[in-house]
Amino acid sequence: MKRSLVLAMLCISLIAALAACSKKQPLSPIETLGKRLFFDANLSQPTGQSCATCHARPGGWAGPDSEINRTTAVYPGAQTPRFGNRKPPTASYAGFSPKLHINKEGDFVGGMFWDGRAHGHDLGDPLAEQAMGPFLNPLEQNLPDKKETVRRVAAADYAALFREVWGPDSLSERDADAAYVKIAKSIAAYERSHELNPFNSRFDDFWRKAVAARRAVDKIDEKNMAAYTGLGLSDREVRGLMLFNKKGKCAECHVLTTPGAHPPLLTDFTYDNLGTPRNPRNPFYTQERQWNPDGTKWADPGLGGFLKGDPRFARHAAANMGKHKVPTLRNVDLRESASFVKAYLHNGVFTSLKEVVDFYNTRDRDKKRWGPPEVSANVNTEELGDLKLTDDEVGAIVDFMKTLSDR
């Protein structure tokens, strides 16, 4: 009798899963084209590297190679022995970032890349501008120019789809600049598709139930926490959410409010210097002088480095040295297996969420453990450094963040 009941329950679960899959919308033609481009390992010199080499679902649409995450954290380029200088951020939910601008508080918001250099003011879309970067970056996909990129796309088995989406002359080498923009916009369309932005984590289910019950998630605190139980998260996860919102100060930047009908994006798209220590495993320190003339003395300037080189923003450079973009926490723990190692923060110096929260909690109380910041200017001392969280509270926050993984 028990076996029959178990089988019946399994069948019901399978039917429910199949029904959910049947509701999944197919990709549009431009999203399908973008996906083909995203996974095309022929768009590098030498061949073998695609966008997905650094951004794929096994790593939460961030670094998908556990061993690289455990060791260098920074990914090698197509041309051996070149490496980039930062770990790959997640590509999921990236399309919600606005164009780089200064808000009313005087803080920079938006743009793409850790340093905001894909500002969005050229194409009107930071995500598409970001997609234009890696193909021609000698430390990444290393193609020589836009014309060669277009030539390779024109020779691909999805070239007919490209022309169907963009027009019969869209892959003309005579106008390689325009074709290159279309390539980037196609990739951005895929990165905005439901495959990378499904909003189907356990937290999303909880958030929708909370909204239906008229309980604002960003208002959770120690006094009203009980009102948020029974909505899909365990009591410990609800406690972790409360600590995330209050004592841990995580929601100061990884905000629990939302600008749309969708659940929170868990980032305000601003920039911060967390006082992150250098990652001694970063191979960029020993990169050839052609790519890193500062050698082991190199320190990542982040947003300030980009602003310094742009006449429109140069006057703001000093106040933003060492700051990097606040990433979304969506899929922060998504991994292909329990043993899969992920790397965290802009240089991948930490390899566990607990280590990250410990750092936020005790950075200023245990300087011997963490070491000095990579860039000492503009370090955030208001929202992290000495949070006075207990080990159990740290663990509860980590357990909450594990509910943010898409299914």
Image: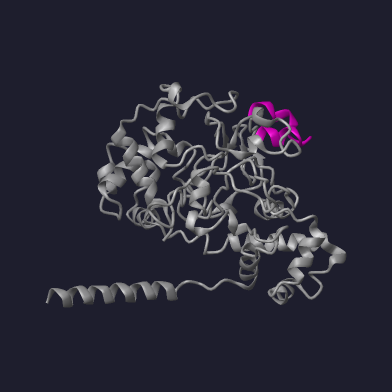
User: Where is the N terminus found, in terms of image quarters?
Assistant: bottom left
Kindly identify the residue that appears in the image at 30 percent across and 55 percent down.
Answer: 232
The one nearer the camera, 276 or 231, is: 276
Q: Position of residue 387 (x, y in %)?
A: 39, 28
Q: Is residue 145 visible?
A: yes
Q: Position of residue 182 (x, y in %)?
A: 73, 63
Q: Position of residue 186 (x, y in %)?
A: 67, 64
Kindly identify the residue that appears in the image at 54 percent across and 40 percent down.
Answer: 326
Kindly identify the residue that appears in the image at 47 percent across and 38 percent down.
Answer: 350
Q: Quadrant of residue 153?
A: bottom right
| Chain part drawn in magenta | 303-320
Kindly identify the residue that appears in the image at 74 percent across and 74 percent down.
Answer: 163
The one nearer the camera, 255 or 356, is: 356
Structure colour scheme: one colour
* Count of all numbered marks drawn on residues in the image: 0
Q: Is residue 220 visible?
A: no
Q: Quadrant of residue 27?
A: bottom right
User: Where is the C terminus found, in terms of image quarters?
Assistant: bottom left
Residue 298 relative to residue 366: left or right: right
User: Residue farthest to the front?
Assistant: 81
